[in-house]
């Protein structure tokens, strides 16, 4: 097909692969191909290939680098190029593209025509002298050479073209890129009819769903030839300026994808790409209509049909320069006359209005002529796309497709909406969308009538084509001529042309309608319509609102640079009276001479010499203090929520965060590029002390080092972030937190930011979303924002469950009258209902009237320029009116005059010269500099330069103040150094000043309490997104005194209906008990031997957590909490309870308040503090009552914020941010009452990120959204205190990590320890092992010294004891004293629970991926037990990796025995003794991972579990050997487990002896020891460890952590070890660590850690029935048998406090529940008389008996209470009968070792399940007090009677029938029976 005469057939390119990049200038792999980006890179060019430059029509200013085979390129003559193509992508390196079509798709040329290499490969690329790749000569293709010359010879330069022809646009692009200009551009003033597209007035990037206009072909024609220039993107300024500020419009970057369905009934116009030459079609083509062609001037601009189309991908960026024209063979183009509209000359000048055409239904005509004087807006076009709504969207709305409105109904609905708009209102898309939704949902007629007061006709009724004009005129008839209806029958162009013609001819005095609705009722096309906005205010506001903030700031800059504002400046040189202000100022300056207004303590008419004024110093404040950084209750609550959410991430099960591996916290804070904000944040970090608390810096260095933790997002961020990433990689055990503060400010993607959004945009994306930030497992990202809406889209990277919202405010009743409360955005809106004379939210009506007058006079200037000049003039006149010209008062608005009067007069009333601050918000830097210059000039000429300061608040510059004002501030602050200068706005506290705040957006700076006024009169209709508007009001948000608020405030910026959630939120916060107070310097907190008493041990979530993240296991959130008691701290022990009691819950750097109160106390007391948490406070001067700041708004902003009084749309319903778009024009109504959580869900469902948004690339396919697992979002109102909250979060995060590395261990001193150690030491203290002879001669210490025995019965001994001395004799039912614990840092030798994960031990606890849980084998092990009266079958569950510890039969693989070593074996890497750990209820919490404790040495570790718990233990400990007890032991106590361990071990010993004996080993050589160890054993210590040179008597005590391996191997190496029956260690306490060396070995009771000789103790058994004190009972049995028990006193065991599991899980409850709310059961009810109607309990009988004996000793043994000299005699048993009663143990066995009882008189006799060794003669040897009591316990009533008879007890003891009892069990549960009696 010929390239010159083919019709414009759109080229349908192949869709890009899913997930590939489609950005112009980048290949589909996402690699940059632009020459400007890769010019300095080393590109590998294969042999035979050459680098060439390709041109994309979408980005004509860029050249794309390609590698092409030379054979397919022409020679110097443009010939000899092979047909076809062969090329490579230099970006991603993909090779072998054989078709240019395929290659053009890969490099994203996005062509609308058939791709041809001749058209798009333009230049050879060469290297310049600097070695950079640059554009070289043109590629001469033979076929275009003649065309180029023809085009150039045909087109003559004109005034609208550049003087020289651009070589870059050679070939087919023979025209300069500067061809398109507007009438206002400097280069086109001689020719006002420059060609321009009307779409140059809309930023389509602000509305993703907008249908992009199809590009059209264009030609250059002579005077009588038609032209159709490239359709431009609807973007640019209202007067036709492009984004670059130069004349011209930016061009549509890619063709649309038209939908098959159109709501218009006429065929649309389809055009080709600008690169495609145009010509008349050879056959009838869509979009070409028959009819006689008409001549069209050369300035015609085709505006294509805009119809509802399927949402397509929008251009990411627009070209900053206009699209060049295409030259070629020029032929006339046939265009129907009805489809063309000539824009009249001087339309704007004649009418004073630039009409805005709102696209509706149908095809817009071509416009030509003075097209710069009109604007085309697609504001409401998406609202008419009803047929494109998918079923899913309708389903969400609860609607059916039958409810969709027809075209006629939508036209009438639009008319009704326009009629209801006021004269000061403009159409808002969101408002109209709500109306459409309500209409579709079928509201009742009455409600719809009230909603649309123009007409009551239900728009859902069908309207015929003939009825439509009549109904439309009827609807408009009530508008008071503000809305006109124009009906045409051929095309919309007729009505538009008629309207524009009449507009140019209308008399100036005649009022124009605000809106003209053009309706075309063509039978051929159906109904079409559009709206022409002619109202002066409405048209200007709509045109300006179409510009982005960057665009209108560039527009303002252009107007200032080109001098267009000169006419406005000359207007303001005089007052309304005609007096020349400058002359008046000069005259006043000459009259006052060298005198100036007194700086303070005087009126404005009191003058002094300037030297005297400069030397005046204010009075110093008495009692002024240093700044104190404080943390308040709301901040604490938020910090806890953040910590809770971090714990939820760790507990979620996706293993994205392992908190257990971190021991340190580091951070970096990213802030927007603001110097003030940078210093403000660094000051917060410095004052908070967080650097010291985290151990990052020394206290002396924080002033110099704080700033390195705060980074501005400017050009220097790259190097600083790279250094931070290196730290992250180098410190895998440090948890880094990257905090992105004010994260809504810049979320432009890196790719788009580098193209055209300026070099400072896209930096946040490069940092936050870089690969290192996404993949580093030790990096948390916390994004902080007051306006998080741009982070809450369908493509959000943050899970909704990882959002933390600011908590609800406390109710008024709970807070004191003086407390300050937050006054936020909603409070400003509600303040309009106060009805006070001076509201805090105001609109200056007088100023608005002046603005409107000037807007009419100067229609070509941007309204912000006019507003700025007027505002400067107002403040100028106000200053003059207050000082020199009172006549100007009438020409100054009362608002301006009142503000300046307060500002100027306040310093004169204050003795120190303090005053108020005024903020004037001027977004444009040029206008702000102009304002400062003018106001400073006027101030100085009026002599006020010492009265108040004028400061330019620019983000890019430091604060600059006059020297005398700095001196004054330093005098107020008292303590500042000589070189101090203010760096933050808070440093200006009390300074009377005007701050002219400039910049695109406020960046989160905090202002001082002296700020009183915020002048936002420049913020008008250009700010029509929620973020843009509300962040301006956020400048005024602050904490105010409650008495200044006129009405009760509800929750902070939240609806009243959520108040009920406040209590639950506060209660949740109390569940988290980390140190709330800033802890003291934690220098010892990270040492291996430090011990801490931290207030609490864990975190409890207070925010909603996804159910998928909740687990039944112990999580980081529900770790058990414990608190240390007050007490002395030994050396090496850190006491760290840092709560502050009655002090406010605040962190103070200057005076920390340590005490022993709990964290909940500090939390509750914190609510009484009345200072604001958003800033540092000073104890010196402060305003008497903090007032809400006064805000003065423009009318447009006031209407949106005060909509409750005006009935308009509220700002919260606007588009949330300019970087996002609505995903559907129909969506549920947005209610102001939504909570922040509900708002987040709403935006996540109904908004999507635009293509230039950083999150846009996060969408994978249509549904899959990738949330980053370690990213959180903190949201809160502006200036509420978020910085303090996240700094506190860092602190408590570190504290929690330390707590994860700490453990609460029992810290209890042994009972009567000093008495036991007072005995004569018979062995030197430096001996390593006990001497068997010495130990044999030692008397056994009968008293249990274990701290647990403090509340049990003491064992009688001949030596005195302190157990009963001074005991409180008040009888108590329950001993509820909490055992003392202390927090201690875990070491590398610690035992761990299931939550510990590390690389060293994961193979020890976890199943490897190659194995499965089924790779364990179940083995039965049967043996006979005389105690149980038969055979017992146990089951072993043995992992295959542990089978080497067992012996199996050769056939059948039957378990035969556990392997035992020999006594003579010596292997340092093996522990000889099998380790048995009985455990119950602690499958998660039990410290069963002893890999580190054994230093990885080989060992046999067996967990002894109950049958019903076996599945849990098998799940959590799949690599451990399990010994499963028979089912009959499911309800037994620990005594049964120890009994079975010992029985099994002895049987196994015999089996091993037999097996090894066959191998020639003597039976005595088999190792007879086992280790029975508690599941709470955590650490082991060696005491009195001293160097050999430190043996002096005054050597200080010391201890160190050692491993279980060290302890056990040392004990196993004891000489003659087989002669010891039991060996053990003592219990650790901090008192023990401080004691002098004592006896190295003792013969006494041992507990918890028992090395048991099962051979020697063969005949001594654990009582299998016991629940308590089974170890004391066994120790006494073993000692009475003459066996040696040795305790190694130089070793100690630390036991962790585990609140769950063990016997504590037994709940005593009735067997038959009558009521679920049953009260606790008294211990006296544990027993009852036999056969009585007593409440039976569902608890084992033995458990009830032991519990009864503990609490009922005063009933059983009244004579023994506190009678140590007359103990209770217990035969063959030890039972706890309360700590008030002493027990004298006696053994009935022959040859047993017993206490000498001569002369001892007993107060009672206890016989417990006595066997045949107890005979009557034995009992007769003992003497009893008269009245002594007897208690005989037996298994049943029969044996009880037999025992009484057999022991002849009735001879000396008196019994009564009523003294027989049983445990409160049913007969099925086999109760125990006992009989009491009295000695006669």
Image (cartoon, rainbow, N blue to C red):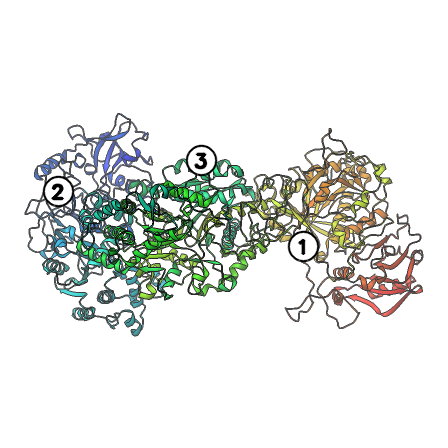
Q: CA distance from mark 2 to mark 3?
A: 52 Å
**Residue situated furthest bottom in the rendering:** 446
Snapshot quadrant of residue 1705? bottom right
Location of residue 65 with respect to 1773 vertically, above or below: above
Q: Nearer the viewer, mark 1 or mark 3?
A: 3
Q: Residue 1795 in the image: x percent, y percent?
A: 89, 49
As displayed, is residue 223 above or below residue 153?
Answer: below
Q: Residue 1089, percent across and down?
A: 64, 39
Q: Is residue 955 left or right of residue 1878?
A: left
Q: Is residue 1789 left or right of residue 742?
A: right
Mark with earlier residue (1, 3): 3
Q: Closer to us: mark 1 or mark 2? A: 2
Residue 1687 position (above or below residue 1057) = above
Q: Residue at x 42, y 38 (%)?
A: 721
Q: Which residue is mark 3?
A: 723
Q: Residue 422 versus residue 913: which sits nearer the camera?
A: 913
Q: Secondary structure at mark 3?
A: helix
SS of the residue at dot 1?
A: helix
Task: Give x and y (percent) for residue 109.
Answer: 25, 42
Q: Quick one: 319 or 1732, which is closer to the camera? A: 319
Q: Secondary structure at mark 2?
A: loop
- Residue 504 pos. (x, y %): 11, 57
Which residue in the structure is indicated by mark 1? Answer: 1507
Q: Is 1473 in front, or is 407? A: 407
Q: Could you tell me if the residues under marks 2 and 3 are in contact, i.e. CB atoms within 8 Å?
A: no
Which callout, 1 or 2, points at the residue further toward the start of the chain?
2
Q: Quadrant of the C terminus?
A: bottom right
Mark 1 neighbour density, 10 Å: few (under 14) some (14–19) many (20 or more): some
- Check the picture and name the quadrant holding the N terminus: top left
Gap between marks 1 and 2 measured at Cα: 94 Å
> Residue 160 got which mark?
2
> Dot 2: few (<14), some (14–19), or many (≥20) neighbours within 10 Å?
many
């Amino acid at each position: 097909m010929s390239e010159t005469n083919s019709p414009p057939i759109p080229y349908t390119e192949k869709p890009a692969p899913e997930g590939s990049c489609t950005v112009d200038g980048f290949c589909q792999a996402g690699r940059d191909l632009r020459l400007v980006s890769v010019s300095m890179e080393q590109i590998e060019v294969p042999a035979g290939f050459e680098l060439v430059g390709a041109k994309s029509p979408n980005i004509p200013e860029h050249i794309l680098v390609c590698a092409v085979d030379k054979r397919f390129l022409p020679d110097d003559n443009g010939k000899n190029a092979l047909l076809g193509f062969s090329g490579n992508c230099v970006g991603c390196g993909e090779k072998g593209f054989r078709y240019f079509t395929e290659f053009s798709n890969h490099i994203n040329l996005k062509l609308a025509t058939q791709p041809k290499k001749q058209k798009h490969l333009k230049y050879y690329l060469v290297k310049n002298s600097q070695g950079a790749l640059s554009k070289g000569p043109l590629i001469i293709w033979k076929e275009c050479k003649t065309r180029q010359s023809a085009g150039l010879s045909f087109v003559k330069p004109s005034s609208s073209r550049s003087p020289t022809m651009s070589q870059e646009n050679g070939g087919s692009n023979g025209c300069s890129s500067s061809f398109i200009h507007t009438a206002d551009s400097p280069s086109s003033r001689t020719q006002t009819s420059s060609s321009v597209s009307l779409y140059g007035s809309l930023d389509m990037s602000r509305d993703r769903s907008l249908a992009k206009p199809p590009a059209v072909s264009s030609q250059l024609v002579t005077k009588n030839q038609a032209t159709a220039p490239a359709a431009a993107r609807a973007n640019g300024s209202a007067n036709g300026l492009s984004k670059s500020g130069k004349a011209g419009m930016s061009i549509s970057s890619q063709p649309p994808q038209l939908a098959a369905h159109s709501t218009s009934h006429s065929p649309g116009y389809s055009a080709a790409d600008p690169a495609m030459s145009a010509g008349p079609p050879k056959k009838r083509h869509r979009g070409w209509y028959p009819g006689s062609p008409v001549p069209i001037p050369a300035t015609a601009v085709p505006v294509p049909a805009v119809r509802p189309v399927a949402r397509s991908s929008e251009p990411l960026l627009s070209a900053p320069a206009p699209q060049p024209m295409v030259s070629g063979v020029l032929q006339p183009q046939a265009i129907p006359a009805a489809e063309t509209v000539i824009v009249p000359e001087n339309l704007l000048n004649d009418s004073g209005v630039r009409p805005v055409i709102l696209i509706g239904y149908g095809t817009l005509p071509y416009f030509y002529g003075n097209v710069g004087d009109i604007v085309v807006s697609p504001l409401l076009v998406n609202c008419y796309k009803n047929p494109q709504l998918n079923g899913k969207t309708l389903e969400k709305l609860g609607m059916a497709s039958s409810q969709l409105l027809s075209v006629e109904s939508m036209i009438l609905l639009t008319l009704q909406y326009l009629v209801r708009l006021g004269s000061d209102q403009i159409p808002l898309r969101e408002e109209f969308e709500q109306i459409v939704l309500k209409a579709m949902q079928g509201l009742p007629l009455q409600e719809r009538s009230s909603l649309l007061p123009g007409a009551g006709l239900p728009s859902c009724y069908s309207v015929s084509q003939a009825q439509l004009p009549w109904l439309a005129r009827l609807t408009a008839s009530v508008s008071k001529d503000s809305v006109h209806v124009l009906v045409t029958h051929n095309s919309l162009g007729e009505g538009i042309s008629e309207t524009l013609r009449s507009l140019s001819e209308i008399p100036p005095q005649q009022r124009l309608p605000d809106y003209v609705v053009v309706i075309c009722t063509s039978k051929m096309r159906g109904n079409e319509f559009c709206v022409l906005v002619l109202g002066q205010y409405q048209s200007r506001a709509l045109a300006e609102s179409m510009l982005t903030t960057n665009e209108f700031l560039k527009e303002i800059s252009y107007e200032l640079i080109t001098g267009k504002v000169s006419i406005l400046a000359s207007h303001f040189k005089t007052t309304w009276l005609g007096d020349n202000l400058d002359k008046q100022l000069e005259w006043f300056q000459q009259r006052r001479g060298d005198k100036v207004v007194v700086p303070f303590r005087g009126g404005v008419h009191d003058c002094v010499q300037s030297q005297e004024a400069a030397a005046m110093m204010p009075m110093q404040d008495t009692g002024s203090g240093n700044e104190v950084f404080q943390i308040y209750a709301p901040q604490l609550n938020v910090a806890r929520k953040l910590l809770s959410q971090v714990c939820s991430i760790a507990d979620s099960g996706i293993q994205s965060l392992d908190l257990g591996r971190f021991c340190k916290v580091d951070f970096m804070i990213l802030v927007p590029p603001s110097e003030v904000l940078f210093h403000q944040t660094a000051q917060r970090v410095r004052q908070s002390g967080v650097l010291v608390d985290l151990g990052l810096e020394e206290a002396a260095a924080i002033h110099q080092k704080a700033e390195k933790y705060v980074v501005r997002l400017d050009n220097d961020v790259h190097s600083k972030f790279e250094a931070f990433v290196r730290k992250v990689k180098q410190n895998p055990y440090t948890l880094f937190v990257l905090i992105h503060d004010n994260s809504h400010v810049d979320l432009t993607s890196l790719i788009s930011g580098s193209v055209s959004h300026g070099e400072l945009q896209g930096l946040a994306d490069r940092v936050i979303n870089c690969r290192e930030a996404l993949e580093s497992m030790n990096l948390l990202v916390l994004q902080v924002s007051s306006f998080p809406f741009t982070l809450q889209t369908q493509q959000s990277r943050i899970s909704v469950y990882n959002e933390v919202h600011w908590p609800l405010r406390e109710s008024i009743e709970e807070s004191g009258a003086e407390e300050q409360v937050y006054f936020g955005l909603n409070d400003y809106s509600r303040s309009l209902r106060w009805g006070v004379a001076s509201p805090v939210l105001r609109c200056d009506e007088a100023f608005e009237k002046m603005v409107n007058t000037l807007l009419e006079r100067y229609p070509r200037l941007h309204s912000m320029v006019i507003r700025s000049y007027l505002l400067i003039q107002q403040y100028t006149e106000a200053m003059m009116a207050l000082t020199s010209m009172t006549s100007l008062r009438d020409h100054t608005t009362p608002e301006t005059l009142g503000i300046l009067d307060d500002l100027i007069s306040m310093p004169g009333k204050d003795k120190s010269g303090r005053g108020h601050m005024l903020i004037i918000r001027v977004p444009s830097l040029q206008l702000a500099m102009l304002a400062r210059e003018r106001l400073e000039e006027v101030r100085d000429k009026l002599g006020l330069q010492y009265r108040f300061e004028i400061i330019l608040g620019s983000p890019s510059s430091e604060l600059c103040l006059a020297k005398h004002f700095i001196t004054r501030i330093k005098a107020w602050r008292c303590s500042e150094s000589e070189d101090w200068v203010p760096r933050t706005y808070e440093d200006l506290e009390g300074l009377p000043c005007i701050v002219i705040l400039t910049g695109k957006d406020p960046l989160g700076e905090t202002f001082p309490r002296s700020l009183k006024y915020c002048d936002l009169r420049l913020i008008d209709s250009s700010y029509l997104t929620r973020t843009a508007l509300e962040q301006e009001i956020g400048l005024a948000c602050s904490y105010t005194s409650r008495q200044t608020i006129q009405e009760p405030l509800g929750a902070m910026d939240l609806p009243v209906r959520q108040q009920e959630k406040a209590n639950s939120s506060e209660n949740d916060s109390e569940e988290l008990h980390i140190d709330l107070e800033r802890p003291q310097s934690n220098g010892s907190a990270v040492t291996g031997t430090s011990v801490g008493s931290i207030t609490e041990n864990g975190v409890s979530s207070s925010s909603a957590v996804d159910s998928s993240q909740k687990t039944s296991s112990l999580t980081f959130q529900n770790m058990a909490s414990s608190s240390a008691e007050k007490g002395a701290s030994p050396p090496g022990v850190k006491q760290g309870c840092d709560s502050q009691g009655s002090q406010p819950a605040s962190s103070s750097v200057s005076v920390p308040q340590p005490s022993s109160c709990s964290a909940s106390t500090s939390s509750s007391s914190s609510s009484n503090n009345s200072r604001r948490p958003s800033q540092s406070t000073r104890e010196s001067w402060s305003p008497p009552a903090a007032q809400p700041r006064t805000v003065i708004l423009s009318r447009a902003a006031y209407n949106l914020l005060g909509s409750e009084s005006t009935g308009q749309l509220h700002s919260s319903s606007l588009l949330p941010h300019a970087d996002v778009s609505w995903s559907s024009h129909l969506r549920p109504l947005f209610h102001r009452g939504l909570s922040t959580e509900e708002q987040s869900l709403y935006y996540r469902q109904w908004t999507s990120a635009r293509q230039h948004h950083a999150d846009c690339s996060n969408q994978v396919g249509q549904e899959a959204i990738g949330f980053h697992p370690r990213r959180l979002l903190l949201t809160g109102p502006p200036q509420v205190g978020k910085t303090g909250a996240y700094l506190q979060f860092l602190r408590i995060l570190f504290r929690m990590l330390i707590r994860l590395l700490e453990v609460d261990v029992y810290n209890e001193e042994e009972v009567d320890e000093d008495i036991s150690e007072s005995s004569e030491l018979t062995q030197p203290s430096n001996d390593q092992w006990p001497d068997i002879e010495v130990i044999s001669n030692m008397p056994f210490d009968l008293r249990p010294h274990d701290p647990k025995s403090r509340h049990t019965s003491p064992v009688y001994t001949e030596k005195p004891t302190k157990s009963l001395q001074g005991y409180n004799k008040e009888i108590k039912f329950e001993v509820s004293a909490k055992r003392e614990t202390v927090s201690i840092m875990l070491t590398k030798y610690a035992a761990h629970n299931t939550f510990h994960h590390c690389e060293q031990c994961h193979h020890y606890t976890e199943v490897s991926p190659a194995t499965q849980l089924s790779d364990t084998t179940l083995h039965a092990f049967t043996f006979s037990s005389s105690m149980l009266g038969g055979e017992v079958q146990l089951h072993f569950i043995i992992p295959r990796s542990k089978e080497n510890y067992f012996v199996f039969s050769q056939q059948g693989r039957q378990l035969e025995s556990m392997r035992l070593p020999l006594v003579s074996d010596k292997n340092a890497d093996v522990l000889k003794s099998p380790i048995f750990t009985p455990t119950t209820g602690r499958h998660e919490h039990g410290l069963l991972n002893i890999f580190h404790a054994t230093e990885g040495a080989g060992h046999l570790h067996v967990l002894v579990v109950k049958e019903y718990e076996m599945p849990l233990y098998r799940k959590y400990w799949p690599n451990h050997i399990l010994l499963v007890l028979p089912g009959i032991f499911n309800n037994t106590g620990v005594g049964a487990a120890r009994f079975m361990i010992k029985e099994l071990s002895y049987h196994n010993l015999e089996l091993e002896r037999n097996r090894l004996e066959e191998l020639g080993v003597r039976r005595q050589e088999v190792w007879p020891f086992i280790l029975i160890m508690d599941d709470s054993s955590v650490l082991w210590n060696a005491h009195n460890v001293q160097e050999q040179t430190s043996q002096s008597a005054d050597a200080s005590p010391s201890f160190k952590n050692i491993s279980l391996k060290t302890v056990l191997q040392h004990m196993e190496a004891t000489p003659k070890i087989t002669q010891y029956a039991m060996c053990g260690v003592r219990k650790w306490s901090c008192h023990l660590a401080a004691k002098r060396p004592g006896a190295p070995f003792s013969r006494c009771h041992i507990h918890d850690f028992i090395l048991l000789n099962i051979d020697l103790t063969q005949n001594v058994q654990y009582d299998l029935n016991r629940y308590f004190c089974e170890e004391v009972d066994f120790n006494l049995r073993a000692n009475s048998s003459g066996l040696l028990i040795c305790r190694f006193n130089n070793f100690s065991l630390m036991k962790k406090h585990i609140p769950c599991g063990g016997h504590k899980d037994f709940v005593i409850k009735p067997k038959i529940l009558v009521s679920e709310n049953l009260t606790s059961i008294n211990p006296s009810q544990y027993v009852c008389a036999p056969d009585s109607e007593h409440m039976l309990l569902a608890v084992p009988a033995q458990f009830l008996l032991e519990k009864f004996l503990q609490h009922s000793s005063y009933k059983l043994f009244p004579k023994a209470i506190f009678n140590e000299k007359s103990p209770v005699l217990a035969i063959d048993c030890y039972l706890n009968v309360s700590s008030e009663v002493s027990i004298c143990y006696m053994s009935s066995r022959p040859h047993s070792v017993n206490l000498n009882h001569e002369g001892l008189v007993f107060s009672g006799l206890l016989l417990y399940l006595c066997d045949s060794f107890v005979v009557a003669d034995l009992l007769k040897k003992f003497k009893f007090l008269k009245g002594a009591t007897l208690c005989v316990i037996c298994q049943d009533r029969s044996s009880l009677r037999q025992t009484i008879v057999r022991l002849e007890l009735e001879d000396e003891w008196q019994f009564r029938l009523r003294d027989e009892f049983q445990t409160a069990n049913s007969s099925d549960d086999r109760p125990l029976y006992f009989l009491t009696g009295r000695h006669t």
